[in-house]
């Protein structure tokens, strides 16, 4: 399938507490209203093997995990997810909405963990073989605001990243700004500090331009 013929591939990125779940729900409803067939999936995870890898990566008891091990596990989960779920959906004409995809690895492992964006990109190129989103919405939230939202949400999944301090989350934001410079044609910044209804309006506007 040629690049310009495939269904729209959207990924949602951002730091902790950026509101990805609400945005993804809104995108899914919008696509359904437009009668656009699609799937919503998450990374790491999405399929049985990748979910098991997710449990290993994000387990709060695995704090001794080496950064390179972490990066390789993310790439392994991504590969299985892509082959087993994402590509079959695309091949049947379905749009795909990702809750995180390859940019998360470039930011978290490449930039924040210090492995180098190029090094982590190389690992992931082996896994995804050039499969990138058409549109990435970066929900840009001030770390202090994002962490405050997390603390006020008792139903949210608690994982290893929640044990990191404010400096870590500030580095995450820096990493996304660096990635935006590298992919300006694909990554669109959404101000996620705003009220949720304003964020969702901005998101729908971006999707409308492409469908």
Image (cartoon, rainbow, N blue to C red):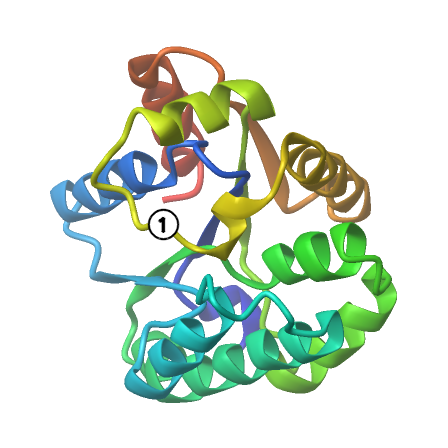
Q: Is residue 39 above or below residue 19?
A: below
Q: Is residue 83 above or below residue 190?
A: below
Residue 169 drawn at (x, y percent): 64, 36
Q: Is residue 61 above or below residue 126?
A: above
Which residue is tagged 1?
158
Residue 192 drawn at (x, y percent): 48, 22
Q: Is residue 191 above or below residue 121?
A: above
Left or right: where does residue 159 sit relative to residue 137?
Answer: left
**Corner quadrant of residue 55:** bottom left
Query: Along the line of sight, which residue is nearer the eye, 183 or 3?
Result: 183
**Residue that appears at 35% across and 77% down:** 51
**Residue that appears at 39% across and 20% down:** 199
User: Is residue 192 something that shows in the picture?
Assistant: no
User: Is residue 207 something that shows in the picture?
Assistant: yes
Left or right: where does residue 118 sit relative to residue 80?
Answer: right
**Corner quadrant of residue 121:** bottom right
Quadrant of the rendering where the C terminus is positioned: top left
């Amino acid at each position: 399938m040629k690049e310009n013929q495939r269904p729209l591939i959207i990924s949602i990125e951002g730091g902790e507490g950026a509101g990805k779940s609400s945005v993804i729900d809104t995108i899914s409803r919008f696509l359904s209203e437009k009668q656009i067939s699609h799937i919503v999936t998450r990374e790491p995870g999405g399929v049985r093997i990748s979910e098991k890898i997710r449990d290993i990566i994000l387990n709060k008891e695995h704090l001794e995990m080496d950064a390179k091990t972490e990066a390789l596990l993310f790439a392994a989960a991504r590969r299985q997810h892509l082959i087993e779920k994402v590509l079959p959906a695309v091949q049947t004409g379905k749009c795909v909405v990702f809750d995180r995809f390859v940019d998360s690895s470039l930011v978290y492992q490449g930039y924040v963990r210090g492995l180098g964006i190029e090094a982590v990109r190389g690992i992931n190129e082996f896994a995804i073989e050039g499969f990138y989103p058409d549109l990435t919405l970066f929900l840009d939230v001030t770390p202090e605001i994002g962490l405050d939202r997390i603390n006020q949400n008792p139903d949210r999944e608690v994982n290893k990243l929640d044990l990191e301090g404010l400096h870590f989350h500030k580095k995450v934001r820096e990493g996304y700004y660096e990635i935006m410079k590298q992919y300006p044609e694909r990554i669109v910044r959404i101000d996620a500090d705003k009220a949720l209804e304003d964020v969702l309006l901005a998101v729908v506007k971006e999707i409308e331009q492409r469908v």
